[in-house]
């Protein structure tokens, strides 16, 4: 879904989407790698001086497998979002970046692809590894044991060096 940034109202453009909206569903599937069970997007797109700001919230829940035990889990991702997009020509090619500059995305200046915005947001919210003990994860099956075996550290292999106290 492409939003023309040239004609944005001063109060912003409100967008609400759910699983029944194909663009939002496609964005969630691209980012999450699975079809969401629940999907809710409510954002407002604002025109700034030389940028576009997307504020609101986006949440999704999906089923997948635990990366440790392969048991079925339900994962909830999302929350409040506040994203800023600038046109590609407004930033020099070589630039010292501050930590706040890392939250800026880029677009062509004419239109903003909302499916790409939502997919990027969900992808950034997703943890690298999904395990049964991760936050915002619910176990769906209790048949798999999701615990790493306790390793026996074995004997202490460090040896005391009799020459360690000699000072030259």
Image: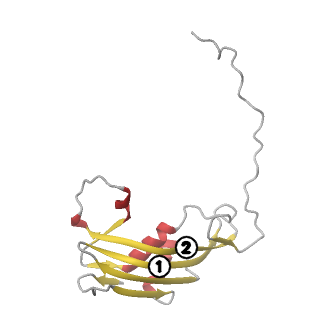
Taking the spot 37% from the left edge, 77% from the top edge, the residue there is 54
Q: Which residue is mark 2?
A: 77
Which element is circle 1 on?
A: strand
Res 139 → quadrant: bottom right
Query: How crowded is the residue under tag 2: few (<14 C-alpha within 10 Å), some, or many (20+)?
Result: many
Where does residue 22 sit, x and y in percent of width and height? Answer: 45, 87
Q: Image height check: is 38 above or below 122?
A: below
Q: Image height check: is 162 above or below 106?
A: above
Instruction: Kindly report the distance in space between the C-alpha atoms of the residues bearing marks 2 and 1.
Output: 11 Å
Sequence-earlier tag: 2 or 1:
1
Image position of 109 (left or right of 168): left
Which element is circle 2 on?
A: strand
Image position of 10 (left or right of 29): left
Image position of 113 (left or right of 125): left
| Quadrant of the drawing holding the C terminus | top right
| Residue 28: assigned label | none
Res 75 → quadrant: bottom right
Taking the spot 75% from the left edge, 66% from the top edge, the residue there is 144
Image position of 70 (left or right of 128): right
| Quadrant of the drawing holding the N terminus | bottom left
Where does residue 6 sit, x and y in percent of width and height? Answer: 23, 83
Where does residue 157 sit, x and y in percent of width and height? Answer: 73, 30
Q: Image height check: is 83 above or below 8?
A: above
Where does residue 100 sit, x and y in percent of width and height? Answer: 37, 60
Residue farthest toward the front in the current orientation of the protein: 11
Q: Are marks 2 and 1 in contact (CB under 8 Å)?
A: no
Taking the spot 34% from the left edge, 71% from the top edge, the residue there is 84
Taking the spot 23% from the left edge, 72% from the top edge, the residue there is 50
Q: Which residue is mark 1?
A: 57
């Amino acid at each position: 879904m492409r939003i023309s940034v040239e004609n944005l109202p001063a109060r912003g453009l409100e967008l609400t989407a759910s699983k029944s909206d194909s663009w939002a569903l496609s964005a969630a599937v691209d980012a999450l790698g699975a079809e969401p069970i629940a999907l809710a997007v409510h954002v407002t797109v604002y025109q700034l001086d030389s940028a576009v700001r997307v504020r609101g919230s986006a949440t999704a829940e999906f089923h997948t497998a635990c990366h440790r035990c392969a048991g079925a889990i339900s994962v909830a991702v999302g929350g409040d979002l506040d994203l800023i997009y600038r046109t590609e020509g407004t930033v020099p090619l070589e630039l010292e970046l501050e930590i706040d500059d890392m939250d800026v995305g880029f677009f062509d200046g004419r239109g903003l692809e909302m499916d790409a915005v939502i997919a990027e947001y969900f992808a950034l919210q997703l943890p690298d590894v999904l395990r049964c003990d991760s936050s915002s994860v619910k176990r769906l099956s209790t048949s798999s044991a999701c615990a790493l075996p306790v390793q026996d550290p074995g004997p202490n292999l460090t040896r005391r060096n009799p020459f360690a106290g000699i000072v030259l």
